[in-house]
Image (cartoon, rainbow, N blue to C red):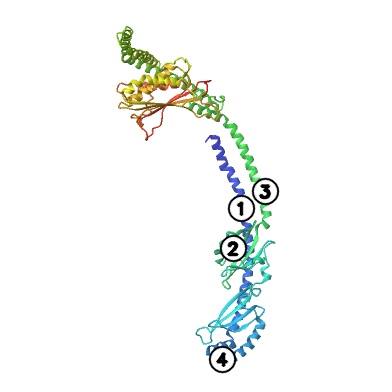
Amino acid sequence: MSLRAKLIGLFFLLAVVPLGAIGVIGYVQSMHALRALIAAQAGAIAERAASEVGERYVQRESDLLLLAENAETQRLYRARASGDAAQLAGALVTADAYLRSAWEQFSRSYEWVEFRDRRGQVLYRLGQTLGEAAGALTVTKPIMGTSGGPAYGNLVAVVRLDALIPSAVLENRFGRAGYTMVLDRTAGEVVYHPSHALVRQPVAALLGPGGWGVNAALLGQERGSFAYRERDTARVAAFVSLGTPPWTVLSSGAVDEFAAPFIQTRLVNLALVLLVTAATAVAFVVLMRRATRSLDALTRAADEVGAGNLAPSLPRAGRDEVGRLSAAFALMVGRIRAMLREIEASRHMAAVGEFAAQLSHEVRNPLTSIKLNLQRLERDAAAGALPAEAAIPVRISLREIERLDRVVRGVLALGRDRPERRETCALHGILAEALEVVRPQLEQQRVVIETVFAARCDRVAGEPEHLKALFLNLFLNAAEAMPDGGCLRVTSEGDDPAEGGTATKLRVRVADTGRGVPAELRDRIFKPFFSTKSQGTGFGLPLAARTVEEHGGRLELAPDDTHAPGAVFVVELPIAPGAPGP
C-alpha cells in the first residue's frame, strides 16, 4: 500500500468515519427514542384495557358463583343425587322461579347457561341458543356441595364478549393509525380486532413469518413490547397478558405517523455532517496528491529498477526532501549500472580465461589430430584404397570435426558479444540434420527416435549452424542419459494465436526416458562450470541457453512429471517476421 493510500486511509479512519458514525448514531438514537415513546403510550392504553377486562371477568365469575351456590341450586343437585323423581320435580319447580328471576338480571351478559350433572346431562338451561356462539367465551364452574365431597356437576356458561371487552376502552388508540386488539392464548385465535375480518383468525398466522414475524411465545410474558412491520408500515406494539381469562391485550402504534419530524431533523443534521466530511476529505486528498506526486514517481522508478530497467524516469530534483531523495536515487542507479558493467566484464574475462586453457589442451589438440587422420582416410578413399561406402562416414566425420572446431571457438566467445548474422531457415530441416548426425550413436545404444513435427510454420530467423549445435547438444545429453536404451522424442508445435491470427512462436520439445534431473539440481544445470559428468566442463547447457536467448527465445527444463521418466527440454523461438503461414 502506498504512503498516500495509508495517509488517506488514516484520515478516513480518524476523521471521516467518526463524523459519519456520530450522524448515524444520532439518527438511530432518535428513532429508538420515538419507538420507546410509542411503546410507552401503547403500553398505557393496553394496561387500562386489560384492567377493565379483568374487572369485568371477575364480575362475571361472581354472577356464576351466585348461580351455582344458592340454596335452590344446591337443593336441585341434592335431589338429583338422591335419585327420587318426585323430589327432583319439586326442586326443579323451586329452582326455576329463582333462576328465572336471576336470569333477567344476567341475560345481557350471557348467551346461555346450563346446569349439568356429573355425567354431563343437562338438568336445567337458561337462554335459547345452544352450543358455543361466535364472539363469546365459554366458562365452566364446578358446583360443589355445602358439606364438601365431590362436585355435584358443572355450570357451563357462554359469556358475551361485549360483556367482557369494553368497546369504549378498546377504541382508544395512539395516533390515527393505532389500534387495540385482544388475543386468546389458550385457543390461539384473535378475540377482538377493529377489522372484523381478523376476528377468530389464528394468532400464529398473524404473528408468524408470513405476518408480523414475531415469536408467539413472547405473549406468555406478563407485559412487554416489540417492533414489527405490517405491510409496508413500521409499528411498535405493547401488550399486557391476563391470567384469567387467558387473554392478551395488545395496543399498536405506527412509527411512520410520528417519525416525519424526527427523520427530517436527523436527515438535515446527517446531511450537514456528511457534506462537511466530504468537503474535508476532498480537500485533504487534493493536498495529499500534490504532496506525494513526486513520491509516486520515485516509487515507480524503484519498481522499474527492481524489474531490471536501470534507466528509469525520475522526478525532477528539487530543494525539498523528496527532491534530494530523487537526486540521491539517480546517483545510486548510475553507480549500480557502472558496477554491473564491471561485474559482467570481469565474469566474462574470468570465464574465458579459465576455460580457454582447458579447451586448448583438452579439445582443440585432439581435434587437430583426428582431423589430419580423417583427411588421410579421405584421400585413401578417393584413391580407391578404401571401399566406396567408407567415403560417406569419413566426409560426415570431417564435417562434424569442422563443426566441433566452430563450437570450440564459439565457447571461447561465450564471454564476448557475437555479431548478429540472421537468415530465415527451416527449423524442421535443422532438427532432421542434427538427428541424422546422432542417429548412429543412438542406434548403437538401442535408443528409438520419434519425431512429431506438428508446427505448421517452422521458419525462424537465426544462424543455422548455431541452431544445429544447440539441438545436437540437447540430443547428445539425452543419449548420455539413456546408456541402456530408451526413446528420444522430438516434437514441434506452434503457439495458440487469437482467432483468425497466425502463430508467433515455435516450440520444440526434446524428451528422453533417461534418469531425469534430480530436483536439487534443476536450478543449477544452466550455470557455467556446473556438470554432473566427471569429464564434463559444464558449458553445454549454458551455451545452448545463450544461443536460444541470442535468437530471441528461451530454453527451459519442463516441470518434473512424476508419472513419466526422463527429462523434457523446451526450446521456444520466435517465428521469422513475414514467414508464410501454413
- Sequence-first tag of 1 and 3: 1
Q: Identity of the amino acid at label 2?
A: Ala
Q: Would residue 119 be visible to someone looking at this image?
A: yes
- Local SS, label 2: helix
Labels 1 & 4 near each other (Cβ < 8 A): no
Q: CA distance from mark 2 to mark 4?
A: 52 Å
Q: CA distance from mark 3 to mark 4?
A: 87 Å
Circle 1 is placed at which residue position?
A: 28
Q: CA distance from mark 2 to mark 3?
A: 40 Å
Task: Name the foreground residue: 52 vs 85.
Answer: 85
Instruction: Quadrant for residue 450, please give it.
Output: top left
- Sequence-first tag of 2 and 3: 2
Q: Identity of the amino acid at label 3?
A: Val
- Local SS, label 4: helix
Q: Identity of the amino acid at label 4?
A: Ala
Circle 2 is placed at which residue position?
A: 205
- Local SS, label 3: helix
Circle 3 is placed at which residue position?
A: 268
- Sequence-first tag of 1 and 2: 1
Labels 3 & 4 near each other (Cβ < 8 A): no
Residue that sits furthest to the top in the current view = 383
Dot 1: within a 10 Å radius of its alpha carbon, few (fewer than 14), some, or many (20 or more) residues?
some
On the image, the x and y values in percent for residue 503 come to: 51, 26
Circle 4 is placed at which residue position?
A: 85
User: In this rendering, would 346 be left or right of 28?
Assistant: left
